[in-house]
Image (cartoon, helix red, strand yellow):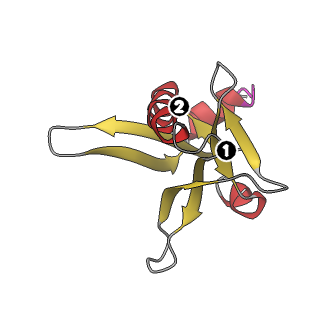
């Protein structure tokens, strides 16, 4: 499953609470951007059968991932980054040592 940092979860929750005032059924979904090769976006949507659902620590649904896309995102990490020039969500590969740690493997054996 896609790993999501605490900072990314907090930013998703903050933005979602503003949107749910208008429609309490919506949450964010990671979607492919069809006009751009190998690019993903985050859009507002309602849940569908088979979605993977990520919740905040308070139990709020903050992110939906289609089951087909979830397989492609295996071993990836969603983060929120701020620099002096830009801010936003990023998806990157989980570093291999961290991946071994998460799976409780000892990579040095």
Q: Residue at x 57, y 62 (%)?
A: 31
Residue extending furthest toward the bottom: 35
Based on the picture, tell me whether residue 104 belongs to the magenta stretch: yes
Task: Using the numbered discs, state the Cα–Cα distance from disc 2 to disc 1 in whole angstroms.
Answer: 18 Å
Magenta-highlighted stretch: main secondary structure? loop
User: Does any portion of residue 107 appear in the rendered image?
Assistant: no
What residue is shown with label 2?
9
Q: Residues within 10 Å of mark 1 (few under 14, many from 20)?
A: few
Q: Which mark, residue 37?
A: none
Q: Residue at x 48, y 49 (%)?
A: 92
Quarter of the view holding residue 84: top left
Q: Which residue is drawn at 52% across and 36% down?
A: 21
Q: Position of residue 100 (x, y in %)?
A: 67, 33
Marks 2,1: beta carbons within 8 A: no
Residue extending furthest toward the left: 84
Q: What element carries label 2?
A: helix
**How many circles with numbers are drawn on the protein?**
2
Q: What stretch is highlighted in magenta?
A: 103-107
Quarter holding the N terminus is top right
Q: Where is residue 59 in the image (x, y as percent from the top left)?
A: 70, 24
Quarter of the view holding residue 49: bottom right
Q: What element carries label 1?
A: loop
Compared to residue 11, the image places residue 77 above or below, namely below
In the rendered structure, the answer to whether residue 69 lies left or right of residue 85 reads: right
In the rendered structure, the answer to whether residue 65 lies left or right of residue 97 reads: right
What residue is shown with label 1?
25
Precedes in sequence: disc 2 or disc 1: 2
């Amino acid at each position: 499953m896609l790993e999501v940092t605490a900072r990314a979860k907090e930013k998703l929750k903050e933005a979602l609470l503003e949107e749910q005032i208008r429609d309490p059924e919506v949450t964010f979904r990671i979607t492919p951007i069809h006009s751009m090769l190998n690019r993903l976006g985050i859009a507002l949507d309602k849940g569908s059968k088979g979605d993977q659902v990520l919740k905040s620590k308070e139990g709020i649904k903050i992110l939906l991932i289609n089951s087909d896309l979830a397989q492609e995102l295996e071993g990836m990490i969603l983060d929120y980054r701020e620099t002096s020039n830009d801010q936003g969500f990023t998806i990157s590969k989980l570093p291999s040592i961290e991946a071994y740690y998460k799976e409780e493997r000892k990579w040095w054996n």
